[in-house]
Amino acid sequence: MTTPPSIEAFLRARRAEGRKLLVPYVTGGLGKDWLAVVEAVAAAGADAVEVGIPFSDPVMDGPVIQEASQRALADGITPAAIVSALGRIDTGGVPIAVMTYYNLVFRAGHTRFAKSLADQGIAGAIVPDLPLDELDGWGEAADEAGVETILLAAPTTPDDRLVAICERTRGWVYGVGIMGVTGERSALAASATLMAKRLKAVTDKPVLIGIGVSNPAQAAEATADGDGVIVGSALVRRLLEGCGPDGAADFVAELRAGLDTR
């Protein structure tokens, strides 16, 4: 079994250089050129890439990502096909994490799914409907395979649980910027900056804020207190509109510039 690169070590090294971290989200299987999109955003300034594995009954995804997932599923994409394909691309050393739901992990089997990720060099996994106190089985299998399980912390999470989440998360801690599903917002929620402050007060692990970060200005605002951002719906909307790898790279480059000049 292959040992994937460490997302946390990679992000810590980039943070130590004074860099604000950027993780774009790409829906796996969206269009025939989706692998080229992953490579393009990695080359355009991403510090990691989050690849969504489409699922028919998501609980966290808003309308844009749901539409992208439905298109991919209609084209016949499968979790195994996405994982296998990711092992064949060149991101220039930028690590990849997949985002999926526990039903797919459970059906594949904890050990088998973790091994499949590791064998393709996939460094991390986000399973948003698998909370901290239900990690038994998957958590151990992922750790054994060298796959980092990235946990989410919400604005409503109590302080003591926030500490426990930060202790158990691997790779980074995913601070949810606003309650609700993914989607673009006209302004960054006040809860996003508060989430960053709360997390930075209790952990030295990379703190990235996601959900509701939609443009370079919001990305810069979210990183005033946090270490970085995850941008999904704003990028996926562009992909649904046909921007392709070049357009995706242009958008990620704009986000990168906004973070670098803040």
Image (cartoon, rainbow, N blue to C red):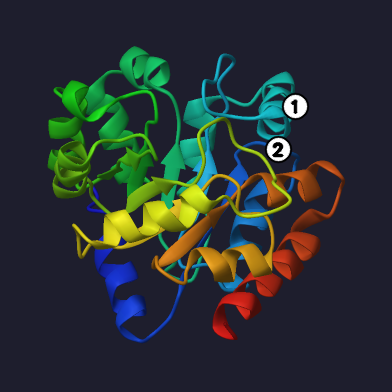
Q: Residue at x 29, y 77 (%)?
A: 13
Q: Quadrant of residue 225?
A: bottom left
Q: Confirm whether residue 29 shows in the render.
A: yes
| Residue nearest the observer in this picture, 229 or 26 | 229
**Crowd around label 1: few <14 · some 14–19 · many ≥20 (10 Å):** some
Q: Residue at x 58, y 27 (%)?
A: 54
| Residue nearest the observer in this picture, 219 or 88 | 219
Residue located beneath label 1 in the image: 71
On the image, the x and y values in percent for residue 244 come to: 80, 54
Is 128 above or below relative to 57?
Answer: below
Total residue callouts: 2
Is 207 above or below relative to 159?
Answer: below
Q: Are marks 2 and 1 in contact (CB under 8 Å)?
A: yes
Residue located beneath label 2 in the image: 30
Query: Where is the C terminus found, in terms of image quarters?
Result: bottom right
Q: Confirm whether residue 85 shows in the render.
A: no
Question: Is 250 displayed left or right of 229 in the figure?
Answer: right
| Residue nearest the observer in this picture, 39 or 168 | 168
**What's the amino acid at mark 1?**
Arg
**What's the amino acid at mark 2?**
Leu
Is 163 above or below relative to 194?
Answer: above
